[in-house]
Amino acid sequence: MRPFHRITLFNMDPDLVSMPLSRAVLCTNCERVSNSRNLRCDVCGSGAVLALQTILDNEDPTPPEPPSPLAAYAVPLAA
């Protein structure tokens, strides 16, 4: 088994890599990005990982509601 599944090296510099976004996870423990198959960090083994595709593809299909036209005229009432 290869240590880096579906990783592409650019040039011969091991610091420049590419991986599918669907596999990329950010470990909140060691602060490394790896390509995990089981949502565990491939570097330190921690389960505290965030799937980057979920964060980066965060497109909300419903647009936000516009503010109410009456909100501009809200006047606090004295007690």
Image (spheres, grey):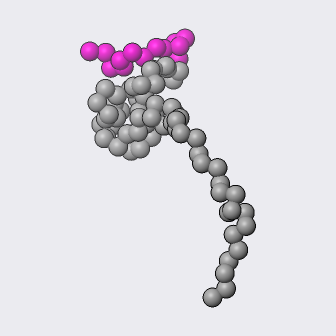
The residue nearer to you, when weighing 70 against 60, is 70
Measuring from the top left, give residue 38's x and y in whole percent: 28, 30
Measuring from the top left, give residue 28's x and y in whole percent: 41, 44
Q: Is residue 30 visible?
A: no
Measuring from the top left, give residue 65's x and y in whole percent: 60, 48
Q: Residue furthest bottom?
A: 79
63, above or below 22, in the image: below
Q: Which residues are magenta?
A: 1-13
Residue at screen point 37% across, 39% down: 49
Q: Residue furthest right?
A: 73
In the image, residue 52 lies in the stretch drawn in magenta: no
Residue at screen point 46% across, 25% down: 21
Query: For residue 11, what is the image quadrant?
Result: top right
The residue nearer to you, when weighing 10 against 63, is 63
Q: Residue furthest top?
A: 11
Measuring from the top left, give residue 79's x and y in whole percent: 63, 88
Considering the whole magenta stretch, tell me its main secondary structure.
loop
Residue at screen point 36% across, 19% down: 4
Q: Residue furthest left?
A: 1
Residue at screen point 53% across, 21% down: 16
The residue nearer to you, when weighing 59 against 8, is 59
Q: Is residue 22 visible?
A: yes
The residue nearer to you, when weighing 43 against 6, is 6
In the image, residue 4 lies in the stretch drawn in magenta: yes
